[in-house]
Image (tube, rainbow, N blue to C red):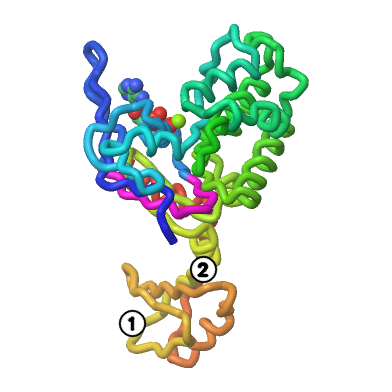
Amino acid sequence: MAAAIKIEGLRKTYAGQGASAPKEALKGVDLEIPQGSIFGLLGPNGAGKSTMINILAGLVTKTSGSVNIWGFDQDVNPRQSRAAIGVMPQELNLDPFFTPRAALEVQAGLYGVPKADRRSDEILELVGLTDKAEAYARTLSGGMRRRLLLAKALVHHPQILVLDEPTAGVDIELRQMLWRNVRKLNEERGMTIILTTHYLEEAQEMCDEIAIINHGEVVVRDRTEVLLDRLDAKTLVIVPEAEVGEVSLPKGVEMVRRLHGELAFSYARSNTSAEAVLQAVHAAGISIRDVRTEEADLEDVFVSLTSSKA
Ligand code: ADP
Ligand code: MG
């Protein structure tokens, strides 16, 4: 499948302000995001998510590397690559004197959308701002401003929609509205969605694929179900009475020898039972002094992946 976005060797170092040292926010990121997916960029605060998004949006200048959006290299075809992407930023940066309808018209003008192709009313309806179409932005609640930011990201009919921490600090109703709309845009229009979040659950629920980013590096990237399969991984650790030779194991079980003669048997809970592992241990004539189990959840996967580079 063709890539919606292809990033290679992307680096960003922010110049230090005053006495502060320069900050290397992205340390050579390679990432390919398939067309039509809902892709999650997951990582703790300060990981570099917004930096990456803002480079895609053309709001931050990269230090080096290449960014290709919908087949257009950002440096070679800046206009086309920008036209393919709509970004709902993390910051609420709205002009307080524009009404939602006026803000959408201005945005459409900036992107050169012809009058006949403008869909302001439809977009306001989609985000639930029809009633507020003529209200000044400064009179809108925080939730309504976020809806307007989403609307602005959609005016030029981009193939790719990027949402930077769309649900950080928003109420349940807005969160549900956002997810409904995101799913709808993805399913009905085939829009590629990229969202950043530091909520595991959210990424798990919404995304087909997830990249985990930490300290400016992608530490893992896989289909959500593959990442979740890691949760299926279980390890049975046995402390034997005496040294152990060869062990013949059931299919799907792997044995690793650890310190102090411990044996760690890993298997997938979905197709092997602890009982089957223990039977193999008995069959090998091993007598067990102690036994314990280890299992991961996504939180553990996340923590182990992100803390190793701290
Ligand atoms: P995230 O969105 O994952 O929380 P950011 O991309 O906002 O991460 O930030 C990554 C790192 O770059 C952080 O250490 C942050 O302090 C730093 N940073 C972000 N923007 C700037 C800036 N304009 N100037 C200097 N440092 C910045
Ligand atoms: Mg951010």
Query: Residue 31 lies in magenta, yes or no?
Result: yes
Instruction: Judge by depth and name the residue closer to the eye, 69 or 26.
Output: 69
Q: Secondary structure at mark 1?
A: loop
Kind of residue sitting beneath label 1: Glu
Give the residue furthest to the right: 131
Q: Which residue is mark 1?
A: 243
Asked whether, in this view, residue 72 is left or right of residue 41, the answer is left
Q: Which residue is mark 2?
A: 234
Give the residue furthest to the top: 97
Asked whether, in this view, residue 97 is left or right of residue 259, the answer is right
Residue 1 x %, y % = 44, 61
Label 1: how many residues lie within 10 Å, few (<14), some (14-19) or many (20+)?
Answer: few
**Residue drawn 51% across and 39% down?**
158
Q: Which residues are magenta?
A: 28-40
Kind of residue sitting beneath label 2: Lys
Q: Is mark 2 within 8 Å of ligand 1?
A: no
Query: Residue 184 lies in magenta, yes or no?
Result: no
Residue mark closest to the camera, 2 vs 1: 2
Residue 54 x %, y % = 40, 31
Q: Quadrant of ligand 2?
A: top left
Mark 2–mark 1 distance (CA, rounded to whole Å): 23 Å
**Residue drawn 46% across and 49% down?**
302
